[in-house]
Amino acid sequence: SEGAGVIVYFPPRGNLSHEIDAIVDSRNGEIPPQKEPLREYGLGAQVLLDLGLKRIRLLTNNPRTLAGLSGYDLEVVERVAI
């Protein structure tokens, strides 16, 4: 509905089936396990900057704050549940 968007996805360094199960559980209203795979947030931030983004609407079910993005001059203006 926005007319444009960007998805930056880096596969987890762990078990992909564990991540998929966590997504399914969150869609069913269950609280997913807190064992999150390590992500490459810095690399993702650099990709967004290379694409010319500065202010982003973040699509996530994760309530955790990504304060490190401000270090890349990216501003999360809104969080949208997936």
Image: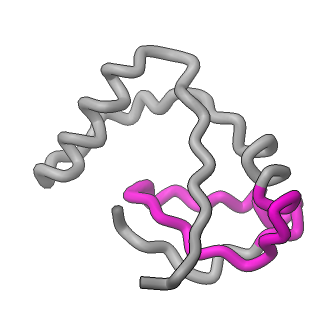
The furthest residue to the front: 3
| Residue drawn at (36%, 67%) of the image | 81
Tell me the quarter of the picture where residue 67 sits. bottom right
From the viewer's side, name the closer residue of 44 and 36: 44
> Is 27 placed above or below 76 here?
above
Q: Quadrant of the N terminus?
A: bottom left
The furthest residue to the top: 15
Residue 4 screen position, x and y as percent: 57, 75
Residue 58 relative to residue 42: left or right:
left
| Residue drawn at (38%, 58%) of the image | 61
Q: Is residue 60 magenta?
A: yes
> Is 39 placed above or below 75 here?
above
| Residue drawn at (65%, 58%) of the image | 66
Residue 6 relative to residue 75: left or right:
left
> Is 4 placed above or below 16 here?
below
Which residues, given as a range, are shown in magenta?
Answer: 48-74
Residue 22 screen position, x and y as percent: 28, 36
Q: Is residue 58 magenta?
A: yes
> Is 76 placed above or below 29 here?
below
From the viewer's side, name the closer residue of 74 and 1: 1
| Residue drawn at (40%, 21%) of the image | 16
Q: How is the image coloured?
A: one colour
Residue 18 screen position, x and y as percent: 33, 22
Residue 75 screen position, x and y as percent: 74, 75
Residue 73 relative to residue 53: left or right:
right
Q: Quadrant of the C terminus?
A: bottom left
The furthest residue to the left: 28
